[in-house]
């Protein structure tokens, strides 16, 4: 005899999770419903009281040069042009882009560095606005990662694994915590428009093996911020209204007759879809913002789809209690012509990044909103390609780079970790990608080791089998 | 204790220190600690094999282990002291000690102690059901014989009867026909088909309906659509900028195979190992593209081996998930935590799939199909290919014949004119004169060479020489643009400052791995010269490498000659006019070596490659023929040498050579004989004609085992950088031992898989077909039959179907036929509240299946009822409507929707871009095709409602449906007749009066709304490319289209009941 058992699901798991995941014969519950239903009101988090209710992640895709922005290394200027010593490189694998270069000349930053605020954090002249809010920020100078190419590195940051197939951090959060609001998706994604550079992939905000309803919903610039949100051309709005009402009546009739719970879910989804047709354009319409907003975020914020506009949109979404927002800004991949190209990147993002922090703070949202700024890896201390007086490039560098955080529960005006004089190796307090993710989840009230989902017989989690909450970063 | 630890922590700990620290506190785990021990040391005499069993003791089952064997038992649970097993294991006398000496098996004290602890803890066994081969179970007795339509129903009914449950009544006939039509063909029945069926009162009406569906071409498309998820099929490579790749011929093969009823074991065998079948047919080779459908990268700077290993691993994981229902991933870095699959065994499977000559990177700069490939000529191409290949062979023969017939000519020449020994004419660059960054060439149209990015000339060899830093180069645009058919020679003086692991001397190519090395090149590899012609490295290239090292720190004259034969034999390397003995590294060049953009013959450096750092070069010669040794010697003379001096020098040099006569003969053959000159020209023409055709023949990635298998290695912690000992192909023994008679390759693997004794394959397969029809498998985790997987509610039914499937020749159609004709399948899917509460997931099967249509079905259904579906089998992928900008914002590529029929094909054919899959599919839970997936999520989200209402595809289809209804019903038809028709098209059932009421009201509102002068009728009627029929009343069409649009979002349209 083969043993049989009653239920395929582990009853010790949170029941709403398994219900969602399986949905045998049923449509899954609404991701927008289970937040309200699934979280005990007194807790607010999944495993402990959260410091952050919401998170906005300003992802700078391509690998911003920490050596030209945050990690001040005068030694590199002193030894500009000298070969990277083997004693510093210590066998670090290089990408195939500079790995076969005849020489690896150290390249000092061409940008002025200064210490800012009470905390005296080093920020270069490329980020004047960020520098002004240095005391609100928590810099991690000792981030490190395992990957040296974009695809695996971004995928590692966003999903905790270098290859495709796993849920994104936002999907995990939405899965674990549910939505805070009734009219908008719980996980929104904003991608700066018209940016060249390394590609992005839908899996970076995908749900992997979690129910697809947890995938990030991209809000795009233009008439249709959410796919298929807008009524078709020529269909009068009141007629759409009638059509939706008719559909709801049909579903009610069917529900009365058949009692299929999936019908109830369908009716609710229809109602939410209808509400989104109003709530999403409303949140995306910046016309009710006062002039002062654009002074803060910069004139770019008037241009929908720009980084600045997305930062502003992020604030509007956070105000409406969207729990998780992921921004992506491409173009930080300065293999060559770094001085020019990096300057452009900074001009596009500096003011708006700082504005978002300031704006959240003055609206009282920064207390329970977490802001994270960073890319997938750092850049080398040597020049990729020729090093000239006015020009250099930097290749990918996984061993150290800088990320900053601000807001809920994060220690402001603090710089964590340090690198060696060459800006090549971490000398104190390394923070791995998994550690960062564990810390973010911790701040959201989630124990990264306990937010798991069983798939293919294994209990998966965002941090795989790694990760440590970095207590030093917390207030 | 184990249970108090956080579950995830235990499960996720890799083996090693962390695991050990908790081990002491844990109960001994039978599956991972005891069974392997007993199995390895004891089962040989005390296991399942009755023939071999000693002393009537068996230890593989608990009852055997604790059985009373004359007043004593091997194991007394909870009582180690009484357990004879332990006493015998520790017996002081060697001859009484187990295992016996002749077995050469031992247990050490720690292992015995472990057994002792386990016995103390109760000696519980766990037997994992899925690892035992299914045997045909007894058919259960049932009370209600009349309900049984197929023997499979007995299993269900017997269980229901024992639970005191009654099956649900049969679904009504229209519901059943709709269910079976979608399940087998992915499309609904037409009203006519419904009428025919409802009017058919013959007892075999259902059989005939099923047979009609199974013989429809749509059936293959439906099953293929499911298989593409498992095969992680996509039309793009998947990583990074995710370029298009042409693999759809494989998809078409899948459709065809399903339609032709290819037996399942063959279907699988072909895909795994079609190339290894005896006299493999093209179709069988094509099937193996299955193993190449994983994602591939071209990201600059990626480490080639890292990704190559990743690809092989993906094949292993796909094999595990799709065919074994096992998660191999775990065993990549350490022994499997749950199932007895060791890391060693993982690499045993890995070794099967590590047998092709591939690269970890596809070519960024060319469109080369990653090797190995299969050619897919059309009929005409095939005919011409044969013809031109024959022409090539004939020309080759004539040339060989001519070679044999020139003895007399040679003698005559030797006597009369050998004395002159004219040097070959080529283009040369001596680097002695520099104007700005140019160096002047001589001879032919040599023109100028360009010194790139600061390359310097220095003093040497009595003039100037090129000095290289590894980053700069000298390039010679317009020179040396040889094809693989052109004989050529390139000669130069060079001096290398030291041993070079790798250095580019010269090349004509766009890049190294970023272009698959397309072109030709002379490198120093491991201190030795290496010459190649390459279409795509490594699978389509020729390369020879000198056996002797290149002299260091001295000027040597180096030449590479090539005869245009596309064979390694035609490549020669020379040092100081001496032909070097070489080893052949690759010998298969079948396609062009051109391509990759603007490229020039270049010395000293290549994009993202290791340059000739510190090297020096002088007197660079390019010849458009293959030179003889004598001419190579002449090319080594100073460029100022006159013809006459050159001849004199050559004669003097020849006089010092032992093989002077052979050298003369070679000179004669290569450069003098007019007979050979013309036969060579003919050969060249024939080769060019052939190559010209070959380069047009489409290719597809496929499997082709390397003649000399690559050595696979155990990778420590799964890291490509940590290869350990060599691993031979092998399979997990806990599943089934590898048959001795099977070959040790993928074909053997397929034999092992489809072996009658394999416990998993048949079960996993029928389970997936059950899932296809019932929405959920008998094992609810189709991807995992291991100990962490779901335990089936109906294990005997699963085994019964598995055995039947196998014994009936693995016929998928027969399997599906009986499943859909069963009473179990035919039940109504409505559930009472009690049943819903008792069995929310319908595990007991006391009702029929119910689920939302798949993403493909939702779209296909809309196109079908909207009279838009273009039913055309196969072909390149198509691009239907998609919101603008989705590709562009991610990768800068532009999605250009098709015009015309590409908009309305079945979703199976929609272009699948992995990093930006079609949103209309993803919103409805399609899998992303990044990795093998055998079960889709099922969710409900507001995005689904929005897509149904507003996606132009849906809106256009709704209008098509309204138009169809208006045309079918005619101008005289009543409003309610039209609405009823429309309703039936959508749901396959008649509308109830209250439903009609709702729709009538909506129709009237819509009609009023569109009658208003400001109504935007034109806009509403022109969504999509389809043009409305001109004879129809536009207001009526617009209004009815609103109703149709509403109906396409209706649950009865979307849910398969």
Image (cartoon, coloured by chain):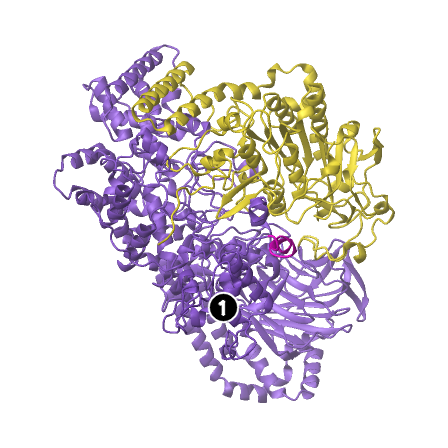
Q: Outermost residue, right direction?
A: A78
Tell me, yes or no, whether the highlighted magenta stretch contains residue B17.
Answer: yes
Question: Quadrant where the C terminus of chain B lies?
Answer: top left
Residue closest to the eye, B528 or A273? A273
Drawn colour of chain A?
yellow
Q: Which residues are magenta?
A: B15-25
Residue B156 locus on image (x, y percent): 28, 45
Left or right of B295? Residue B876 is: left
Label 1 element class: helix
Tag 1 residue:
B85
Characterize the local packing of mark 1: few (<14), some (14-19) or many (20 or more) Cα atoms within 10 angstroms. many
In the displayed structure, B92 sits above or below B705; it is below
* Chain identity of mark 1: B
**Going by the picture, which residue comes out furthest to the left?**
B202
Name the spot of residue B207 as percent of width and height, x first. Answer: 19, 45
Q: Main secondary structure of the magenta part?
A: helix
Is residue B430 highlighted in magenta?
no
Taking depth in this image into account, of A311 and A451 the one nearest to the observer is A451
The image shows residue B959, relative to residue A94, as above or below, that is above
């Amino acid at each position: 005899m083969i043993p049989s058992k009653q239920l395929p699901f582990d009853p010790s798991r949170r029941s709403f999770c398994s219900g969602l995941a399986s949905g045998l014969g049923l449509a899954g519950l609404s991701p927008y419903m289970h937040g309200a239903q699934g979280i005990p009101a007194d807790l607010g988090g999944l495993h402990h009281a959260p410091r952050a209710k919401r998170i906005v992640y300003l992802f700078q895709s391509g690998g911003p040069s920490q050596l030209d922005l945050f990690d001040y290394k005068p030694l590199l200027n002193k030894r500009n042009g000298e070969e990277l010593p083997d004693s510093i490189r210590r066998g670090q694998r290089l990408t195939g882009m500079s790995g076969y270069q005849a020489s690896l000349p150290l390249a000092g930053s061409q940008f002025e560095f200064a210490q800012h605020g009470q905390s005296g954090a080093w920020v270069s002249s490329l980020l004047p606005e960020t520098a002004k809010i240095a005391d609100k920020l928590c810099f991690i100078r000792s981030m490190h990662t395992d990957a040296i190419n974009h695809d695996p590195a971004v995928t590692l940051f966003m999903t905790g694994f270098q290859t495709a197939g796993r849920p994104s951090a936002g999907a995990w959060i939405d899965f674990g915590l549910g939505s805070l609001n009734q009219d908008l998706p719980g996980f929104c994604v904003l991608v700066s428009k018209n940016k060249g550079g390394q590609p992005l992939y839908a899996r970076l905000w995908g749900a992997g093996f979690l129910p697809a309803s947890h995938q990030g919903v991209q809000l795009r610039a233009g008439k249709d911020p959410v796919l298929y949100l807008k009524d078709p051309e020529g269909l009068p709005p009141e007629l759409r209204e009638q059509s939706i009402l008719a559909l709801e009546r049909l579903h009610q009739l069917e529900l009365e007759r058949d009692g299929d719970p999936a019908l109830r879910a369908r009716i609710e989804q229809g109602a939410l879809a209808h509400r989104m047709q109003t709530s999403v354009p409303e949140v995306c319409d910046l016309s009710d913002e006062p002039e002062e907003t654009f002074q803060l975020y910069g004139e770019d914020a008037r241009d929908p789809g720009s980084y600045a506009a997305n930062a502003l949109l992020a604030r509007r979404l956070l105000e409406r209690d969207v729990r998780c927002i992921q921004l992506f800004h491409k173009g930080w991949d300065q293999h060559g012509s770094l001085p020019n190209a990096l300057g452009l990147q900074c001009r596009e993002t500096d003011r708006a990044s700082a504005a978002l922090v300031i704006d959240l703070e003055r609206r009282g949202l920064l207390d329970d909103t977490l802001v994270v700024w960073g890319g997938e890896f750092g850049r080398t201390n040597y020049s990729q390609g020729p090093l000239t007086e006015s020009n250099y490039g930097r290749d990918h560098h996984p061993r150290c780079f800088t990320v900053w955080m601000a807001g809920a529960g994060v220690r402001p005006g603090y710089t964590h970790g340090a690198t060696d004089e060459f800006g090549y190796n971490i000398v104190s307090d390394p923070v791995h990608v998994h550690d960062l993710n564990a810390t973010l989840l911790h701040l959201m009230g989630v124990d990264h080791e306990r937010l798991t989902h069983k798939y293919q017989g294994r209990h998966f989690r965002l941090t795989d089998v790694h990760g440590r909450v970095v207590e030093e970063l917390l207030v | 204790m184990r249970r108090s630890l956080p579950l995830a922590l235990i499960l996720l700990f890799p083996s090693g220190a962390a695991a050990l620290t908790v081990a002491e506190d844990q109960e001994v785990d039978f599956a991972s600690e005891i069974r392997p021990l007993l199995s390895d040391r004891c089962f040989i005499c005390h296991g399942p094999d009755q023939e071999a069993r000693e002393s009537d003791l068996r230890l593989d089952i608990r009852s055997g282990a604790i059985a009373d064997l004359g007043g004593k038992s091997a194991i007394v649970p909870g009582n180690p002291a009484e357990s004879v097993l332990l006493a015998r294991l520790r017996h002081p006398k060697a001859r009484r000690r187990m295992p016996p000496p002749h077995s050469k098996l031992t247990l050490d004290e720690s292992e015995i102690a472990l057994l002792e602890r386990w016995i103390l803890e109760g000696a519980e066994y766990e037997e994992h059901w899925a690892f035992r081969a299914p045997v045909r179970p007894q058919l259960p007795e049932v009370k209600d014989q009349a309900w049984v339509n197929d023997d499979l129903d007995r299993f269900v009914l017997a269980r229901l009867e024992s639970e005191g449950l009654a099956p649900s009544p049969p679904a009504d006939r229209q519901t059943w026909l709709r269910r079976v039509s979608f399940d087998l063909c992915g499309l609904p029945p037409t009203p006519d088909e419904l009428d025919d069926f409802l009017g058919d009162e013959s007892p075999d009406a259902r059989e005939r309906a099923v047979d009609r569906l199974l013989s429809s071409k749509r059936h293959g498309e439906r099953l293929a659509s499911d298989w593409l998820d498992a095969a992680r099929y996509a039309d793009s490579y998947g990583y990074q900028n995710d370029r298009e790749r042409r693999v759809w011929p494989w998809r078409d093969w899948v459709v065809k195979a399903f339609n032709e009823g290819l037996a399942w074991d063959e279907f699988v065998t072909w895909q795994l190992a079609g190339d290894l079948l005896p006299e493999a047919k093209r179709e069988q080779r094509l099937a193996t593209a299955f193993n190449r459908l994983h994602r591939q990268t071209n990201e600059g700077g990626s480490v080639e081996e890292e990704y190559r290993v990743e690809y092989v691993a993906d094949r292993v994981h796909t094999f595990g998930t799709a065919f074994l229902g096992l998660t191999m991933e775990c065993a990549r870095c350490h022994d499997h935590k749950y199932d007895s699959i060791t890391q060693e065994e993982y690499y045993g499977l890995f070794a099967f799939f590590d047998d092709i000559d591939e690269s970890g990177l596809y070519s960024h700069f060319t469109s080369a199909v990653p090797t190995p490939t299969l050619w897919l000529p059309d009929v005409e191409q095939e005919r011409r290919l044969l013809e031109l290949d024959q022409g090539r062979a004939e020309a080759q023969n004539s040339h060989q014949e001519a070679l044999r017939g020139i003895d007399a000519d040679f003698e005559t020449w030797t006597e009369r004119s050998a004395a002159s020994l004219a040097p070959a004419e080529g283009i040369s660059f001596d680097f002695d004169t520099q104007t700005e960054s140019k160096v002047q060439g001589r001879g032919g149209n040599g023109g100028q060479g360009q010194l790139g990015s600061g390359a310097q000339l220095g003093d040497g060899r009595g003039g100037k020489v090129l000095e290289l830093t590894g980053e700069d180069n000298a390039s010679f645009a317009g020179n040396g643009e040889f094809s693989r058919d052109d004989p050529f020679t390139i000669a130069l003086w060079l001096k290398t400052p030291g041993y070079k692991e790798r250095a580019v001397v010269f090349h004509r190519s766009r890049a190294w791995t970023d272009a698959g090395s397309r072109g030709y090149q002379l490198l120093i590899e491991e201190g030795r010269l290496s010459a190649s012609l390459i279409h795509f490295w490594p699978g389509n290239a020729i390369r020879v490498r000198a056996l002797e090292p290149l002299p260091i720190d001295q000027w040597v004259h180096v030449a590479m000659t090539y005869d245009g034969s596309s064979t390694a034999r035609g490549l020669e390397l020379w040092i100081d006019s001496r032909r070097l003995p070489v080893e052949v590294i690759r010998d298969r060049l079948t396609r062009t070596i051109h391509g990759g953009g603007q490229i020039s013959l270049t010395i000293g450096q290549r994009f993202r490659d290791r340059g000739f750092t510190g090297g020096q070069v002088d007197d660079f010669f390019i010849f458009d023929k293959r030179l003889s040794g004598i001419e190579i010697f002449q090319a080594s003379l100073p460029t100022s040498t006159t013809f006459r001096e050159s001849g004199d020098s050559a004669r003097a040099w020849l006089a010092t050579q032992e093989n002077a006569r052979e050298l003369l003969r070679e000179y004669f053959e290569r450069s003098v004989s007019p007979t050979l000159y013309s036969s060579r020209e003919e050969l060249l023409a024939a080769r060019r004609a052939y190559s010209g055709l070959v380069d047009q023949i489409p290719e597809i990635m496929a499997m082709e085992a390397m003649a000399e298998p690559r050595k696979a290695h155990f990778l420590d912690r799964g890291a490509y950088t940590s290869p350990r000992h060599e691993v031979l192909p092998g399979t997990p023994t806990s599943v089934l031992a590898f048959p001795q008679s099977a070959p040790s390759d993928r074909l053997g693997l397929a034999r092992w898989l489809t072996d009658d004794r394999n416990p998993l394959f048949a079960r996993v397969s029928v389970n997936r077909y059950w899932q296809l029809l019932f929405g959920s498998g008998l094992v609810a985790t189709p991807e995992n039959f291991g100990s962490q997987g779901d335990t089936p509610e109906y294990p005997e039914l699963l085994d019964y179907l598995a055995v039947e499937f196998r014994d009936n020749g693995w016929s998928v159609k027969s399997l599906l036929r009986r499943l859909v004709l069963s009473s179990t399948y035919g039940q109504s899917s409505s559930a009472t509240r009690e049943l819903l509460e008792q069995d929310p997931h319908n595990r007991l099967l006391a009702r029929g299946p119910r689920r939302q249509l798949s993403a493909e079905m939702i779209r296909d259904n809309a196109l079908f009822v909207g009279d838009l579906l273009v039913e055309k089998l196969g072909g390149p992928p198509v691009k239907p409507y998609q919101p603008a900008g989705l590709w562009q914002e991610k990768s800068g590529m532009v999605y250009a929707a098709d015009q015309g029929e590409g908009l309305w094909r079945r979703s199976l054919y929609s272009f699948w871009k992995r990093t930006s899959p079609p949103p209309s599919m993803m919103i409805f839970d399609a899998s992303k095709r990044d990795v093998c997936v055998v079960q889709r999520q099922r969710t409900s989200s507001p995005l689904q409602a929005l897509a149904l209402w507003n996606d132009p595809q849906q809106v256009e289809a709704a209008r098509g449906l309204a138009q169809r209804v208006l045309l079918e019903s005619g101008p005289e038809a009543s409003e309610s007749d039209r609405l009823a028709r429309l309703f039936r098209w959508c749901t396959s059932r008649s509308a109830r009066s209250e439903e009609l009421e709702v729709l009538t009201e909506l129709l009237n509102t819509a009609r009023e709304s569109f009658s208003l002068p400001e109504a935007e009728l034109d806009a509403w009627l022109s969504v999509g490319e389809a043009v409305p029929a001109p004879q129809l009343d536009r207001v009526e069409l617009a209004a009815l289209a609103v109703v149709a649009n509403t109906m396409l979002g209706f649950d009865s349209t979307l849910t398969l009941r």
